[in-house]
Image: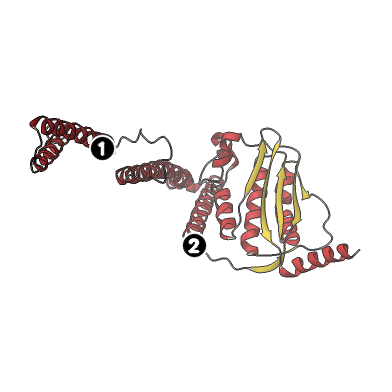
Amino acid sequence: MLFNSRGVALILAAVVAIVTTAFLTLVPDVSSQALLVTGLLSFAATYLLVFIVFEFLVIREIGEIYKLLNKIRKKDFSFIDGEKETTVSNPLKEINREIYNYAVNRNKEIEDLKKLEAFRREFLADISHELKTPVFAAQGFVHTLLDGAVEDKKVRGKFLKRAAKSLDKLDYLIQDLLTLSQLETGESKMHLEHFDIVALANEVIDQMENKAEKKGLILKLDQPYDEPISVYADSDRIYRVITNLVSNSIKYTDEGLIDLGFTLSGQNVKIQIKDTGVGIPPDQLNRIFERFFRVEKSRSKEKGGTGLGLAIVKHILEAHNTNISVTSSVNEGSVFSFKLPLSNQEIDQEQEVELFEEEI
């Protein structure tokens, strides 16, 4: 190819040698031997200079850019192995770096789309299964009644109760899906107010105590709290958060206890729900807040629930600008915790105590 680095160097070297020799001919008494030597030297020097500049600073970089673009066109991102240099003086290298960064971002978008597609397929499969289970159950009971069992009062009552129970499960699932959708889209606004988190926890314990006793579990506060702990949050939403966490602990705890505790820290209070249940494997801790994810699908189906409780908990707390955290050991239990801001009054009291202690 004529217009590669070698061809360009030959053409420019020849031009420079001719021009240089032509200028020397204007000088009087210059021998032909001197003209020849000057022409050869200027040709060689120009050739080497132009060849090196084009080969190592232009052609090679253009070749790298072309290879990069060719791989991107073929959707081959195997060349991505780390961060490219951030500051370069060569403009061609700067172009190469920009293309590389574009490829990195493009590859990340593709990976994210693949994950979203996989999540969508999994979600559709899960929601289809969760919906068809109560629908098919209710449908079976109703059709059995229509086929003649309705004449038997004993069978009719039993089947109608089972059908109603299946439809109730379907209603719970739909309500949880609507709640989750509203939380994710921001349609559900938080109604912040000042309330006593200890009193709210006691309400949850009173509601869930019977369910825990049926399994032989002890549900209580970790210690007596004589003074109220006032927080600033949406009381109804936080009530649901604690209820969901306690209910989840009861489901997966076969013996032992479940306790709720509070720890003051600066301008926040840490709420934790601790159980002595089956625990969660370490490789699944980061997935338990996904919709419909169950650690042990077979056991979870037997224990009921919509599979959306922890996902709802996560989104409610994120709407409060806080996060849910969990530590767990298999066959030893789990601890779920989150923080809420203390009310101004509670903060002022705490600061007064600190000032009093400093004065002493």
The quarter of the picture where residue 318 lies is bottom right
Q: Which mark is residue 66?
A: none
The quarter of the picture where residue 49 lies is top left
- Whole-number angstrom distance, CA of label 1 to CA of label 2: 58 Å
The amino acid marked with disc number 2 is: Gly
Q: Which residue is mark 2?
A: 186
**29 relative position to 269: left or right:** left
Q: Secondary structure at mark 1?
A: helix
Residue occupying the point 10% across, 36% down: 30
Point out the image quarter for the C terminus. bottom right
Looking at this view, name the residue that lies furthest to the front.
Answer: 29
**116 relative position to 325: left or right:** left
Q: Position of residue 303 (x, y in %)?
A: 60, 41
Point out the image quarter for the N terminus. top left
The amino acid marked with disc number 1 is: Val
**28 relative position to 136: left or right:** left
Q: Secondary structure at mark 2?
A: loop
Residue occupying the point 86% across, 63% down: 358
- Within 10 Å of disc 1 (Cα), the crowding (few <14, some 14-19, many 20+) is some
Q: Which residue is mark 1?
A: 53
The quarter of the picture where residue 339 lies is bottom right
- First reached walking from the N terminus: tag 1 or tag 2: 1
